[in-house]
Image (cartoon, grey):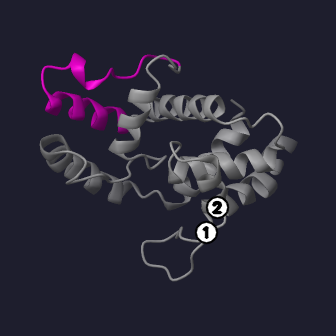
């Protein structure tokens, strides 16, 4: 996985990340999600703003696609569903686990979709949209979503952006400055 592509995929989330808001949302996840499930609380947390439902789907789909270290296993290996959910929240609090989830996401998308013939910018547009929208949609759904403007960089904002446009902006402008060094 190319470092600049990986950062491009999650860059819009890094722009919106707030440590204070994250603490509050993790506290709510520890109460509501662990006890009641994703139907009651499914907040985006951590620097990469991953939801418990996203982590669950990656755990289920990526059982054989591990990153640097094994992630938590599926719910059947836990004594109860609350322990499984607690392990997910704990993993979402850890940046290294979030990087592992990102690698698993990347591998799942590359396995599911043929992106070999796309250039880097098309690939980033597709990957970033799949990251934000969900990797288990069809190729046409992801491509269609890549043009839609629904992403805000602030808590209260009237201006909306395409998630993939923000990813591409970083890749086209900011990453070039890092590559020059």
* Residue with the mark numbered 2: 144
Q: Residue 59 carries which label?
A: none
SS class of the residue under badge 2? helix
User: Which-is-in-front pick, marks 2 and 1?
Assistant: 2
Q: Residue at horizontal 52%, vertical 20%?
A: 65
SS class of the residue under badge 1? loop
- Residue 181 visible at all: no
72 or 74, which lies in front? Answer: 74
Q: Residue 143 lies in magenta, yes or no?
A: no
- Residue 107 visible at all: yes
User: Would you say 1 lies left or right of 76 here?
Assistant: right
User: Would you say 108 lies left or right of 155 here?
Assistant: right
Picture layout, residue 75 above or below residue 28: above
Q: Give the range drawn in magenta.
A: 68-93
Distance of mark 2 from mark 1, alpha carbons? Answer: 7 Å
154 or 81, which lies in front? Answer: 81
Find residue 82 and report its image quarter: top left
Rate crowding at label 2 as few (under 14), some (14 to 19) or many (20 or more) other CA atoms within 10 Å: few
Specify the quadrant that holds the C terminus. top right
* Residue with the mark numbered 1: 148
Counting from the top left corner in percent of width and height, residue 28 is at 20, 53
Q: Residue 79 lies in magenta, yes or no?
A: yes
Picture layout, residue 142 above or below residue 63: below
């Amino acid at each position: 996985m190319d470092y600049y592509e990986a950062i491009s995929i999650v860059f819009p989330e890094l722009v919106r990340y707030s440590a204070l808001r994250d603490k509050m949302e993790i506290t709510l996840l520890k109460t509501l999600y662990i006890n009641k499930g994703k139907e009651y609380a499914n907040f985006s947390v951590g620097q990469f703003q991953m939801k418990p439902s996203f982590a669950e789907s990656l755990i289920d789909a990526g059982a054989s696609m591990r990153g640097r270290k094994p992630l938590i296993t599926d719910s059947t290996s836990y004594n109860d569903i609350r322990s499984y959910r607690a392990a997910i929240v704990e993993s979402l609090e850890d940046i290294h686990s979030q990087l592992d989830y990102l690698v698993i996401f990347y591998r799942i998308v590359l396995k599911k979709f043929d992106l070999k013939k796309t250039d880097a910018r098309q690939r980033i547009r597709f990957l970033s949209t799949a990251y934000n929208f969900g990797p288990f949609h069809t190729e046409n759904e992801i491509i269609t979503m890549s043009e839609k403007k629904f992403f805000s960089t602030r808590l209260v904002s009237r201006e909306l952006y395409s998630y993939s446009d923000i990813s591409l902006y970083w890749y086209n402008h900011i990453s070039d400055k890092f590559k020059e060094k």
